[in-house]
Each structure stands twice: as C-alpha cells, then as structure tokens.
Image (cartoon, rainbow, N blue to C red):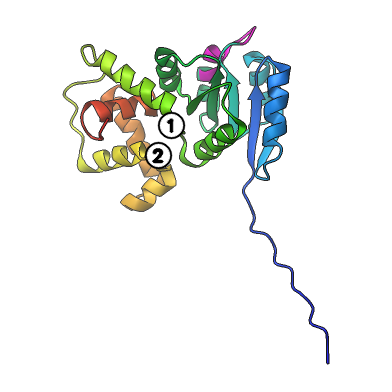
Amino acid sequence: MYEATSIKKTDTLTETINVAITDDHVLFRQGVKTALGMKKDIKIMFEADNGMQLLNMLKHMQPDVILLDVQMPIMDGIATLPEVKKLYPHIKIIMLTMHDESTMITRLMELGANSYLTKNSDSELIYEAIKTCHKHEFFFNALTNKALIDGLRMKRQDSPYAHDVKLNDKEVTVLKLMCEEKSTKEIADIVDLSPRTVEAIRDKLKSKIGARSTAGLILYAVKHNIIEG
C-alpha cells in the first residue's frame, strides 16, 4: 500500500504588460501604481513627472503601455504624444485628464492616442483599458465614442478626407475589421494574409483617405457608412 502523492499543476503563464505612468501629481501616480500593482499581469516599469523626462527614460527602456497625463509642466501630454508615437510607434498610449471635452479627445485620438480616460476613472477601468489597448490597440468607451461621432458631425461640411477614394474589397474588409478592434494578427488570420501585408494595407488606407491615424480611418468608415455610426 502506498500513499498517493499530489501533483501540483503549474499555473497558466500570464503575459506581463509593462506600464509607465507619466503624471506630475505624485499622489495620483502612487494611487494608480498601488492599484495596478495588485494585478498579476501588470508591471510598473517606471514613473515620470513630465514628457521630457518620459522621452529620456524611453531611450533606455520601452513599456508596452504608457499612461500619459495631458496637463504637465515642462512638456505636456499633447506635445509628448506625437513624439512618442514617432519614435516608438508600437507603444500604446492612454491619455489621462480631468477634462472630457470632445474636441480635445478627437484631437488626441488623431495624434495617435489609443484611448482616453478621465483621471477620476476607477482602477478597474484603467486596468481594462491597459489590457485592451495592449491586445487590440484601442480601448473605446463612452467618451471616445461620443468624441469621434461629434468630430465626424463637425467635419461633414468640411471633410479633410478625399471624396473620390475607391477602396477595393480587401481594403474594405481590413477597414471593417479594424473598426471591430481586431488586432493586426487577428485580421491577418481572418483575411488569410501575413501581418506585414495587413500593415501595408493599413498604411495604404491612411494614404488614400488622407487620415493621420487609425482613429481617422474609423471616422472615415463611419462617415461613408462602411460601419454604422
């Protein structure tokens, strides 16, 4: 007779998301850091007081997601956002502010922001936004949806996009899937193309339409009834 020994199952490996917090308010940073620190799949890589300090730190280490305050001394989030996107396009950026003005949200999304949250958002919403941006590139909520639609309405009379654009079936399919928040890999699997080809189609769409960002492509898709607004 023998005593059975239990075999301990190894936990499923969880991908760690490296996050940087850039905000000039120490207490806010500490609160977010403490809340996110309780999540097993989140690692706070570093903190920065302003955009200039963030850019200097990014030379040595790049996180997956940056929480970036809009209003900061020395270099604010509005100036920092396009610089980070130009140098490190793979990094996802979630803008944080006390304001929920549609014009500001639309401007930041067009500059390359992956999401926009007010600073009174609870920690679970911030956590959800981080995970969604990391996996699907964008996190849309009531604020961003309203801003994009408001921005679309304002631009109907004076659209910055080309009016005579002809999109082929493949381009329309990719654009629709982008609007459904599918990642590049997911789109590639669905349309049976390589991720590199999907990225090329996305870049071509921006060029043809005259959009500066994926948010601009989504605005175009809504305006032209490619997706329902």
As rendered, which of 46 and 24 lies closer to the eye?
24
> Dot 1, how many residues are within 10 Å of its Cα: few (below 14), some (14-19), or many (20+)?
some
- Residue at image mark 2: 181
Q: Residue 129: where, in percent of width, then height?
A: 53, 34
Residue type, numbered disc 1? Phe
Q: Are marks 2 and 1 in contact (CB under 8 Å)?
A: yes
Q: In the rendered structure, which disc, 2 or 1, sits on the residue that comes first in sequence?
A: 1
> Dot 2, how many residues are within 10 Å of its Cα: few (below 14), some (14-19), or many (20+)?
some
Q: Residue 172: where, in percent of width, then height?
A: 24, 39
Q: Residue furthest bottom?
A: 1
- Residue at image mark 1: 140
Q: Residue at x 74, y 68 (%)?
A: 8
Residue 215 sits in quarter: top left
Q: Is residue 17 magenta?
A: no
Q: Which residues are magenta?
A: 72-81
Q: Residue at x 72, y 32 (%)?
A: 34
Judge whether residue 211 can be spotted in this image. Answer: no
Left or right side of 111 for 180: left
